[in-house]
Amino acid sequence: MKASRLIAVAVALLLFPAVAQAAPRISIFYYPWYGNPARDGGWAHWLMPGGQTGDIASSFYPARGLYSSSSEAVVRAQMREIAAAGVQEVVSSWWGWGSAEDVRLPMVIKEANAAGVAVAVHLEPYPGRTITTVEADIDHLRTLGVTRIFVYRPFDIPVSDWADLRAREPGVQLFAQTTLAGKADAAQFDGIYTYDVLLWGGDTFARICSQAHRAGLSCLPSVGPGYDATHATADLRVKPRRDGATYDGMWKAAIRSSADGVTITSYNEWHEGTQIEPARSRLRGAAAAARLQTYDGAWGRTGLTAERAYLDRTVYWSELFMRSRRQRPWAF
C-alpha cells in the first residue's frame, strides 16, 4: 500500500477512533429475481428450462412458496425477517440498467429502509460490463441513495481502470470479491469479500483478513450454511449443512479472524442452496418425489420449527459478532 495511504489510515485512527468501531456490520446477499405467472406473466428463476411447476431449480423448497420478487408484501416480509435476524445491510443482486433487478431495486430500498436495514448492491458481471458502464451504474445508483457497491468478479476489468475510476467517483465504497488484497489495493477498492462459501471456507479467513488489513483494506468474509446446486446446474460439488454445524463453523472463523464485517451468502440464492430464508419442512407431491432437502435436524429442530432455524441462528451469531468487535475495537 502507498505510504501516503498508510499515513492517512493512521491519522484517521488517532483522530477519529469512533470510525474504527462503526465499521463492523453484517450484510446479506439478496436476490430480487424471482417471478411467477400470477404476478409476472411467467416463471423467472424458479424452474429448470422447460420444466414444470414441480421441477424447481433448487435442492430446497421455499416455505412461502414460489413467490414473486415484484410483490411488495413478499419483499416487506423478507426485509422484516432480515432485520429481525440482526442483519444491518441487504446487498441486492443487480444486473444493469433495465434488468428486473434494477426495476425492483427502489421497492427493495423502500421496504428495507422501513425495516431499518440499509441497502447496497451486488454489481454482477452483466453482458458488456466495462469501466465506462460501471461509472454510469454508480451515478445511477447514487440517485437512489446507494453508495456501497460489492463488485462480483471485479478483475474482469483491468486494475488500472478501477484506480482511475476512484478519482472520478468520490463518496462511494467499493468492495471487491477477491482474496488478492494487493490487487484490490492497487485497484483502490475499500475492502474485499469472498462470497463463495464452497471455495473459501472458514479456515482461510484469518489469512485473508490479515492480508487485507496489512493493505489497509476492510475484510468482509462470507459465511454460509452450505452449498448444493445439483437441482439447478451441472455442478455436482456439495458443501453439506451438517445440521447447522457448517454455518456455526464459518461464523466462529469470521469472529476469530478479526473481520471488520461479515457478509452472509445468502438470504435467498435458492439455486445454489446457500439460502437461509425459511424452507418448507413438509414436502408433498413433486417436491417430495424430487427428494428435496429440508432444514430438519438443524440445531435439533424438526418440522415447522426447523423452517426458521437458520434465521434464528443468525440472531445469535450477529449479536456475538457485534459484541466481539466492541470488545476489540482496535483489531484492524
Image: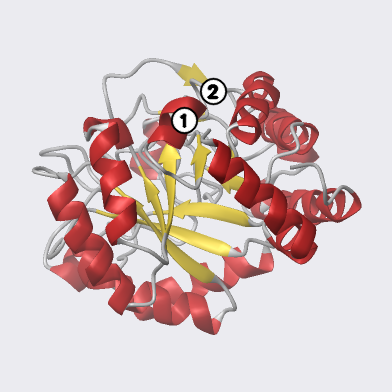
The crowd level at tag 1 (other Cα within 10 Å; few <14, some 14-19, many 20+) is some
The residue identified by callout 2 is 200
The reply, left or right, for residue 70 in relation to residue 148 is left
Q: Where is residue 310 in the image (x, y as percent from the top left)?
A: 65, 48
The crowd level at tag 2 (other Cα within 10 Å; few <14, some 14-19, many 20+) is some
Amino acid on which the number 1 mark rests in the picture:
Asp
The residue depicted at 42 percent of the width and 40 percent of the height is 176
Q: Which of 61 and 1 is in front in this view?
A: 1
Q: Residue 196 carries which label?
A: 1
Which quarter of the picture shows residue 16?
Answer: bottom right
Q: Where is residue 52 in the image (x, y as percent from the top left)?
A: 18, 44
Q: Marks 2 and 1, Cα distance to the nearest angstrom?
A: 6 Å
Q: Where is residue 15 in the image (x, y as percent from the top left)?
A: 76, 63
The reply, left or right, for residue 133 in relation to residue 181 is left
Asked if residue 321 can be seen in this view, the reply is yes
The residue depicted at 80 percent of the width and 42 percent of the height is 331
